[in-house]
């Protein structure tokens, strides 16, 4: 097939993917005066939606980019054990926000475009090559573009990191989610049941009036399991109909072994910068995109693009969230080993001894940082470690 080059000028940065991380990079780098081109495989930014769209209060404070996209506040939730018994947890202050993810992505892309970033929609980056003095990318439409640097931010499942020799994400899960019609459901519900969501959990998140998102993570049969959950919620009168469209997506549980090359950075879900506990990636992706902006700015302003300079990106993002990823993955693997009987037993211990109230009052409790509260919770449960088959040693240290 003939390769057709579009445009003769060299971009400073090309970005594959117009999600949260990619748009943030485009917004900040274009604002610094760099020539930026963003490639998005879908015709419309933010669609299809494959995210529940819950962010912590800290994320909103640090990145004031969500105007017009916030749907509601989160300060409480109902947790359902396998037996069906409910445990309600709440705090006086707002812990998080439910956002319209598609609206957020589009709004941030518009900000980037106002700063001068260019977008090419319906254009998937098919291949990428690092040359001596530039990066060359090829789209699915056989067009080629060249830039001084490149960012892979096209979400989980892209083959670009592997083709560049950066390895593969070491572990992953599948998610399934559907939008449903509801009546008088105002609080988030979380379901812990190894038959429903093996090794993980399911959720019911009210979004706008009369609408909610229902979904789950699972290593196997996520669609079938979600259909079973929808049928159950319908029988309970919580949703209007179980006959809804289901969307699917993969979630990385561990980061890429390497997230940089000379002239190239991988960020967000594509890099595995996702909470292993909840599958949330918006905040961590933005935090790592912040580091990526700084790295690229240093390289471009000095006209230096060595692998050593770009290696600072991985070192710095790991300093920010690496410990959280390790501790969260450890906790995730512990949970996967539990039976429903053991999960019910943990709930019994938590409620009878008021551990949930202690944890809710802990200064370590955070919507976005789970490491310290995980370790505190494991200490509370340490006397029953043998009952759950847990090892004696757990990760430690403050973030």
Image: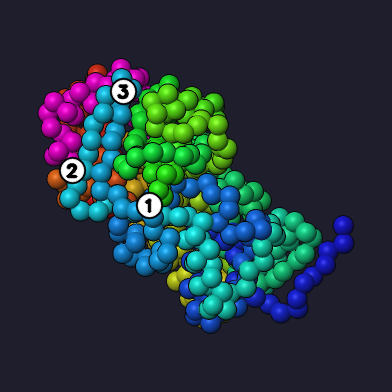
- Describe the element under mark 3 as helix, strand or loop: loop
Residue depicted at x 73% and y 60%: 139
Q: Is 63 situated above or below 188?
A: below
Q: Quadrant of residue 44?
A: bottom right
Residue 372 is left or right of residue 291, and the answer is left
Within 10 Å of the Cα at label 1, are there few (<14), some (14-19), or many (20+) other Cα atoms? Answer: many
- Describe the element under mark 2 as helix, strand or loop: helix
Residue segment shown in magenta: 332-360
| Residue ID for mark 2 | 360
Residue depicted at x 31% and y 29%: 80
Task: Say if the magenta span includes residue 61.
Answer: no
Q: Quadrant of the N terminus?
A: bottom right
Residue 328 is left or right of residue 110, and the answer is left
Sequence-first disc among 2 and 3 = 3
Q: Which mark, by number, is residue 84? A: 3
- Describe the element under mark 1 as helix, strand or loop: strand
Residue 243, position as x, y percentages in the image: 55, 31
Residue depicted at x 87% and y 62%: 2
Residue 66, position as x, y percentages in the image: 41, 64
Residue depicted at x 59% and y 46%: 157
| Residue ID for mark 1 | 98
Sequence-first disc among 1 and 2 = 1
Task: Say if the magenta span includes residue 339.
Answer: yes
Q: Is 376 situated above or below 100?
A: above
Which of the colour schemes (rainbow, by chain, secondary structure, one colour) is used? rainbow
Of the residues tagged 1 and 2, which is closer to the observer?
A: 1
Residue 131, position as x, y percentages in the image: 69, 67
Q: CA distance from mark 1 to mark 2?
A: 20 Å
Sequence-first disc among 3 and 1 = 3
Residue 136, position as x, y percentages in the image: 70, 66
């Amino acid at each position: 097939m003939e390769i057709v080059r579009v445009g003769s000028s060299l971009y400073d940065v090309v970005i594959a993917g117009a999600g949260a991380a990619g748009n943030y990079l485009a917004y900040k780098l274009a604002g610094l005066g760099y020539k930026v081109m963003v490639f998005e495989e879908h015709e419309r930014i933010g669609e299809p939606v494959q995210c529940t769209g819950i962010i912590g209060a800290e994320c909103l404070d640090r990145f004031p980019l969500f105007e017009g996209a916030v749907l509601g506040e989160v300060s409480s939730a109902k947790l359902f054990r396998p037996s069906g018994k409910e445990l309600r947890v709440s705090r006086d202050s707002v812990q998080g926000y439910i956002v319209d993810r598609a609206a957020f992505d589009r709004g941030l892309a518009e900000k980037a475009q106002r700063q001068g970033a260019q977008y090419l929609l319906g254009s998937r980056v098919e291949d990428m090559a690092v040359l001596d003095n530039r990066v060359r990318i090829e789209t699915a439409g056989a067009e080629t573009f060249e830039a001084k640097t490149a960012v892979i931010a096209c979400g989980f499942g892209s083959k670009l990191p592997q083709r560049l020799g950066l390895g593969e994400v070491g572990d992953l899960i599948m998610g399934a989610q559907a939008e449903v019609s509801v009546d008088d459901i105002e609080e988030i519900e979380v379901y812990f049941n190894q038959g429903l969501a093996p090794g993980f959990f399911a959720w019911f998140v009210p979004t706008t009036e009369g609408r909610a998102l229902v979904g789950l993570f699972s290593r196997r049969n996520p669609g079938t399991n979600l259909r079973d959950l929808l049928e159950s919620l319908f029988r309970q009168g919580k949703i209007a109909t179980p006959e809804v469209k289901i969307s699917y997506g993969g979630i990385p549980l561990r980061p890429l072994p390497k997230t940089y090359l000379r002239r190239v950075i991988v960020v967000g879900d594509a890099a595995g910068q996702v909470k292993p506990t909840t599958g949330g990636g918006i905040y961590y992706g933005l935090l790592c995109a912040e580091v990526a902006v700084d790295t690229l700015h240093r390289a471009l302003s000095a006209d230096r693009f060595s692998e050593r300079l770009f290696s600072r990106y991985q070192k710095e993002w790991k300093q920010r969230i690496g410990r959280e990823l390790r501790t969260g993955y450890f906790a995730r693997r512990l949970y996967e080993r539990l039976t429903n009987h053991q999960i019910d037993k943990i709930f019994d211990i938590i409620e009878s001894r008021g551990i949930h109230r202690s944890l809710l009052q802990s200064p370590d409790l955070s919507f976005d940082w789970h490491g310290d509260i995980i370790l505190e919770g494991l200490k509370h449960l340490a006397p029953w470690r043998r009952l759950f088959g847990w090892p004696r040693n757990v990760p430690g240290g403050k973030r």
